Image: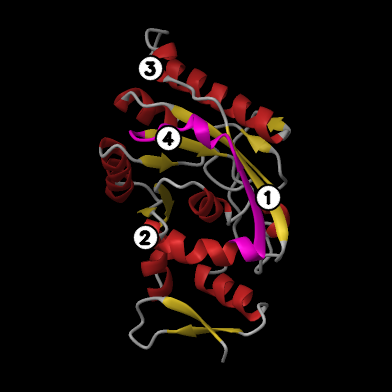
């Protein structure tokens, strides 16, 4: 499904934005790996999915799955919903992440946990390191630059014809951290190295504190798609009558 979505969306997206990918040759051609990008815009996961040829699954907020538009669009983009209130639903989502890696696929997780509101790089949470240590798969730091200019945190509509860069860094392998004392110390050391590698890729200022989520409600993905479509000459957004997906209909 994700490959089909990428095939359809990539030609349009490359007309609207200049997305440069570097370091892709560092990723394995096959087999599991965890991608850990910085998080500066709502568009980060979508742009990463559009530029990296291999399929990537991400964890995202379960509340984004409430409408029929996001219910079908987000899974097509590789999203695994997670209930951030915790409990069994969160555990189920993390189990699903293990299934993705167990199938030899790529899994993406934002180690900061939420978007940076000021562009700084914040302290990473250890979930990615736990997965890497448990499943013995590498973490690839990913530096994303420019998506915060395309769609700043409070903007409802992305800016067209802008540029961004996606840089894949050197792998951080769990074997380096095995036997280094208690598990939580190894997890922290591993994710700290990931964050420092991201800092080198992006040039961001590193802040040794966790990012704080914004209180306001995010605009929906369908709203963003419609808003972008309205800016493209000759393209009108239209919802299919069977309410299964959103299409962009040209020439109306």
Task: Judge from the rendering whether residue 221 lies leftward or rightward of residue 211; answer left or right.
Answer: left
**Dividing the image into 4 quarters, which one contains the C terminus?**
bottom right
* Badge nearest the viewer, 4 or 1: 1
Q: Earlier in the sequence, mark 2 or mark 3?
A: 2
Q: Relative to 249, does residue 93 appear above or below in the rendering?
A: above
Is 26 covered by the magenta stretch? yes
Residue identified by numbered label 3: 183
Q: For numbered disc 1, what is the local secondary structure? A: strand
Q: Which residue is drawn at 57% across and 30% down?
A: 169
Q: Which residue is drawn at 63% across and 32% down?
A: 209
Q: Which residue is drawn at 43% across and 27% down?
A: 129
Residue identified by numbered label 1: 164
Task: Judge from the rendering whether residue 86 lies leftward or rightward of residue 221; answer left or right.
Answer: left
Using the image as rendered, state which of residue 142 and residue 115 is in the foreground. 142
Q: Give the range drawn in magenta.
A: 14-32
**Res 66 quadrant in image:** bottom left
* Numbered tag placed on residue 182 in the rendering: none
CB under 8 Å between discs 3 and 4: no
Classed neighbour count for the residue bearing mark 4: other residues with Cα under 10 Å, few (<14), some (14–19), many (≥20)? many
Using the image as rendered, state which of residue 185 and residue 227 is in the foreground. 227
Q: How far apart are marks 3 and 4 (CA)?
A: 19 Å
Q: Residue furthest bottom?
A: 252
Residue identified by numbered label 2: 75
Q: Where is residue 164 in the image (x, y as percent from the top left)?
A: 68, 50
* Numbered tag placed on residue 34 in the rendering: 4
Q: Earlier in the sequence, mark 3 or mark 1?
A: 1
Q: Earlier in the sequence, mark 4 or mark 2?
A: 4
Q: Earlier in the sequence, mark 1 or mark 2?
A: 2
Q: Position of residue 207 (x, y in %)?
A: 68, 31
């Amino acid at each position: 499904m994700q490959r089909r979505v990428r095939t359809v969306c990539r030609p349009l997206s490359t007309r609207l934005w200049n997305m440069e990918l570097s370091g892709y040759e560092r990723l394995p051609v096959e087999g599991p790996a965890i991608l850990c990008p910085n998080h500066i815009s709502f568009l980060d996961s979508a742009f990463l999915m559009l530029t990296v040829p291999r399929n990537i699954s991400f964890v995202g907020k379960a509340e984004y799955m409430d409408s029929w538009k996001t219910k079908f669009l987000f899974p097509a983009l590789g999203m695994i919903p997670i209930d951030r209130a915790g409990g069994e639903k969160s555990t189920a989502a993390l189990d699903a992440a293990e299934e993705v890696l167990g199938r030899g696929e790529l899994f993406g997780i934002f180690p900061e946990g939420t978007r940076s509101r000021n562009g700084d790089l914040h302290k990473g949470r250890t979930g990615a390191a736990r997965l890497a240590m448990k499943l013995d798969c590498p973490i690839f730091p990913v530096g994303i630059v420019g998506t915060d200019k395309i769609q700043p945190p409070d903007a409802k509509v992305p800016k067209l014809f802008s540029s961004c860069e996606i840089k894949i860094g050197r792998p951080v392998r769990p074997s380096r951290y095995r036997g280094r004392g208690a598990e939580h110390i190894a997890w922290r050391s591993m994710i700290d190295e990931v964050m420092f590698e991201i800092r080198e890729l992006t040039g961001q200022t590193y802040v040794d504190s966790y990012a704080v989520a914004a209180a306001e409600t995010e605009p929906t993905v369908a709203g963003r798609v419609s808003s972008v479509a309205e800016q493209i000459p000759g393209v009108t957004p239209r919802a299919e009558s069977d309410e299964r997906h959103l299409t962009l209909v040209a020439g109306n």
